[in-house]
Amino acid sequence: MRAFKIAIGLVSFSLLLILCSQWIPQTLPQYFSDLTGTTQSQSHNPQSSQDMMDDSSNDDETEKSTEKYVTYLPHSGFHNQRIALINAMVIAKSLNRTLIMPELNMGHANYWLPGKALALQFDDCSRKIFKGPHRVSLNGCYAFRSYNPWSVSSILDLSAVNDQGIRYVERNDMSLDFFEKNFGLTKDDTYYVQDPTRFSYRIYDNSSMDLGSFDFPLQLSVLRQRTEPLISFGSLFGSFRLAIEPNSELWWLREYLTAELGISHSVIMQDSLSIASHLGGPGNYISIHIRQGDGSFRKALKSTIVHVQAHLEKIKGRADPDAVEAMRQLSVPDRLKACVVVNHTVTDPHLRVIFMATDAHNSRESMADFHYAFPCMFTLNDFSNVISNLIETDHSIFLPLVDAEVASHSSRFVGTPKSTFSKYIKYRQRRWLKYYPKAPKS
């Protein structure tokens, strides 16, 4: 009889639980509802946070409750993502927070959107695009048609970040509930820095610089006072996003990371150094970057070539038109070998070995006059035997990075004005140049 009563009691309790679960209203996840609403995050009460920590008997939970984080939303091409990442690293160091690093999109760039919209699009599209044979979803995800995420550490060398004591963790998905699943952080634990326009806030640290193209100032001193476990930015892209006093510690850190945060992917490095050796070896050729593929860069192509050519022709030397014409008569493979052999003995600057990084599909056609003027100028297309492994293994997304790395191992570099790709090459080229003896007439 006693066993029968216990069984009846258990059944009654189960029915009660079912009824209660039906009564509880179904709502959107907290993080999702916050992004779709207009409420502003409120500061945590420091005293209540301390009380929660004092009541905790689990060391791991106490550590989680005291750790503070900062993150942001990535967009645009690889080099723009790298700029945003460096800005985020400087901010994390300044705020003494752990940076949650989003993955790098190595496919076609996704576009900037205001923070809430971009977060929702990441949540929806970063999962959709991997479904189906074409990896394309037309339901608001066209910008993610070739989204190809890679962890930051698989592409970039983070040793300089470690050396500077910048704490970070790598984010492996862009879902809205990522922070709650992995860190137990909800909307009430997060302070959102809204970016309704592409250049909403310029972030200041004791600087008197003007706003420039930005809408309003955001002081690091104010952000340091935030008690929420997570500060979440929208966009951090922009070379001028951080207004930092020259020669300050943060200024030095940004310059250091810009120079040191380079490509470390083994295949990219292997192919880059192989091409550099064909050009005469690191530090023994000149490099240039001509961007022509889109927007304002396409319109400015002629002026870009004039700008680059003027710098090339400043190289001291005596004209030797007969030697230049003789080099033009050789096939490209034979010309490469001949140019490398005479590179350090020629007097005409038009015969110096030049590597051109470019997004032009066939520069020998689209920039025929430029190639004619400099017959010892070569591009990635002239090294098909080296880059074939990238193309055959569907890693052609890495070709622009190979382009940049080959250019960065030169003795002298001339880039496209206002190009972040050129800016990356210039910083890396200066860095590598410290390790190479100066080549004759370079």
Image: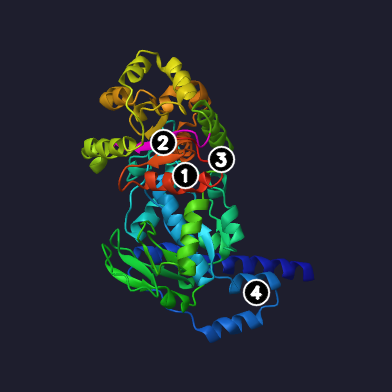
Distance (Cα) linking label 2 and label 3: 22 Å
Q: How packed is label 3: few (under 14 Cα within 10 Å), some, or many (20 or more)?
A: some
Q: Are marks 2 and 3 in contact (CB under 8 Å)?
A: no
Q: Amino acid at mark 2?
A: Ser
Magenta stretch contains residue 286 = yes
Magenta stretch contains residue 417 = no
Q: Please give the name of the residue rendered at 73% of the width and 69% of the height, measured from the top-left corner.
A: 6
| x, y percent for residue 146 | 40, 38
Q: Are marks 2 and 1 in contact (CB under 8 Å)?
A: yes
Which mark sits nearer the N-terminus, 4 or 3?
4
Q: Give the numbered dot on residue 62.
A: 4
Observer-nearest residue: 414 or 81?
414
Q: Main secondary structure of the magenta part?
A: loop
Secondary structure found at label 2: strand
Distance (Cα) linking label 1 and label 4: 45 Å
Residue under numbered circle 3: 265
Residue under numbered circle 1: 429
